[in-house]
Amino acid sequence: MKEKMEFKTETKRLLDMMINSIYTHKEIFLRELISNASDAIDKRHYLALTDSSKASDNYEILIEADKDSRTLTISDNGIGMTKEELVEHLGTIAKSGSKEFLEKIANEKTPDVDIIGQFGVGFYSAFMVAKEITVYTKSIQNGEAHVFTSEGLDSYEIDTCDKEDFGTKIVISLRDNTEDNKYDEFLEEYRIKELIKKYSDYVRYPIKTWVTKYDAKEDAKDDNEEKTHLELETINSMLPIWKKNKSEVTDEELNNFYKSKFMDYQDPLSTIFVNVEGMLTYNALLFIPKKPIYDFNDRNERGLQLYTKGVFILDKCKDLIPEYLRFVKGLVDSADLPLNISREMLQEDRSIKKIATNVEKKILAELGRMLKNDREKYEEFFNDYGINLKFGLYEEYGAKKDSLKDLIILASVNNEKRITFAEYKEKMAEGQKEIYYAIGKDKEAVSKLPQMDLIKNKGYDVLILSDDVDEFMLQVLAEYDGIKFKSINQGDLDLIDEEESKKIDELKESKKDIIEDIKKALPECKDVIFSKRLVEAPCCLAASEGLSFEMERVLQAQHQSHGMKAERILEINPNHEVFKAIEKAYESNKESVSKYAKLLYTQALLMEGILPSDPKEFADSLCELMVESVK
Ligand code: ADP
């Protein structure tokens, strides 16, 4: 019985886009349909591993063109679809890729059509060339056959039908030719062959189409007439690219393979070809996308594809790649794994563990090479993925720190470009004992920090930490090549000589009273001291060793601070006019010091980017002071 159903709203939008598409590579529809056919055969093949009655001994994909009816037909003997699956898969957008695509273009008046290829809108892409699509499908699950028809507008129809073989047959009625668009090309033998070669050469099943063969002259009855006949021919080479010899594969082939398999419209930034033979034999083909692919932050999407002896087994195997490298796309094909391996078994499998360790090593080695030989490319890489390496270093209590520390680049005060820890160390000034760092948005912000005064005078470089994870990463590292990391606003900086230091200590002793009274006014402060790091500025806030202000902020934002706070120390510059003024006021009125102490402290807080707990009090005292000063 025929049933008419409405497409869901978002499907309609996608269809509308396809129908009105000005996308110039309409040809990708064939790639998408062949890929669906191949997936469907994979699924049947997989099912047959546990139920041999469901197997077929000649899996194939057939492409047939009929110029008279102007139809192109794509058939497969894969798993087929039940009626529910037809509704669910072709009537609704189930695929996250298509949803993401819609979200991405939702707010754009003239959507960037070039991203159609990136999102792999699949079946619907056929509406770029079709005026009507008919899908005949017989499910191997329940043996029922259905036909789905649609013009891609608001609705589709589903009916039962007769179909002999399991699998799916998709008939595309091509649109009429227009001035700008000629659809007849998709009926041409040469064009069909070309597209199969271009996009689907590595599909593991034969893709066949009818090819014109010229008969030998002797067979022709009339000499003037050239006789031809049609023969079914397999067009794709089927040998997976990763099984080929590395030297036989061109960059262009690899790039095309990557783009069609992982739905990217740009060439990858880097390709890693791994070929291991021995106790454990496997191939891996890994790609770093130029830009993170849309699902890059979705933790469920991580993982490599797993093949055994060229047969696709599982998608997105997390066990093949560590979390922090989740941006890497690719596949592993091993001859040593059973065909029926399950996700659960993967976790325990020793071969998988070995492969994963090696895959990780290869990726890091490639990154190391890039950093050394092509700095510009590495910087591009680091812009998008550096944060992942930083997390990788920080996670698991720094278990990976030794393999990652030399891949980190950070901005610094004395350099235009980001530098490695090794480069920092190499350029350390004489007498410099530690690697200094500061938290800040950029060079300008950090250079303005009061704590920078003495360091600048000494010419020391300071690493600039701008990502939340940065300081945690340095904590895990603790040191680089024997040199400790040191925050410019924590603890003692050891920047002045002993004599000067002693002088300041003595001064503090002689001004004990005022310091004590300032401290009393500031219960939030753990200590008030005369600074050994300030030159120009009147005061600054320092934290004692341990939790820093930045870490306090990050933990608080993640609700993980558990009430912990960085210990605040107010450092005062005893040589500054401001301190001298406060001292003068103190001599005539001891009470007044509390107000000035609070003002100083709040200033110091603000410079650290921390808001005062009572901004009104701060504003009021400032006003009072202004009024007094002009009296
Ligand atoms: P994608 O293939 O990227 O998931 P599509 O829109 O192309 O997205 O297809 C949606 C779903 O429809 C597929 O995931 C699959 O379940 C089903 N499907 C499409 N083509 C076929 C086919 N030839 N045989 C069986 N199922 C198919």
Image (cartoon, rainbow, N blue to C red):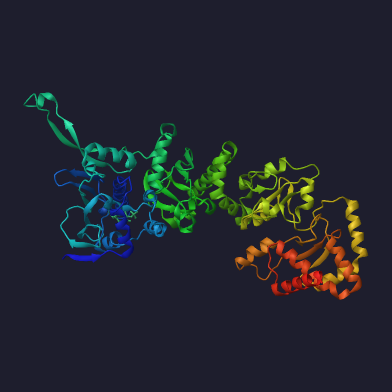
Residue farthest toward the front in the current orientation of the protein:
631
Question: Does 225 appear above or below 261?
Answer: above
Please name whichever residue, 271 or 604, is drawn nearer the observer in this view of the structure: 604
- Percent position (x, y) of residue 606? 71, 64
Instruction: State the image quarter where residue 418 is shown.
Output: top right
- Percent position (x, y) of residue 316? 43, 53
Residue 543 visible within the image: no
- Percent position (x, y) of residue 468? 62, 58
Question: Does 614 appear above or below 168?
Answer: below
Please name whichever residue, 631 or 94, is drawn nearer the observer in this view of the structure: 631
- Quadrant of image for the N terminus: bottom left
Question: Does 17 appear above or below 565?
Answer: above
Q: Quadrant of ligand 1?
A: bottom left
Please name whichever residue, 607 or 44, is drawn nearer the observer in this view of the structure: 607
Instruction: State the image quarter where residue 472 is shown.
Output: bottom right
Residue sitting at 22 percent across and 46 percent down?
Answer: 178
- Quadrant of image for the C terminus: bottom right
- Percent position (x, y) of residue 414? 70, 45
Please name whichever residue, 131 or 543, is drawn nearer the observer in this view of the structure: 131
Residue 500 visible within the image: yes
Residue sitting at 57 percent across and 44 percent down?
Answer: 379
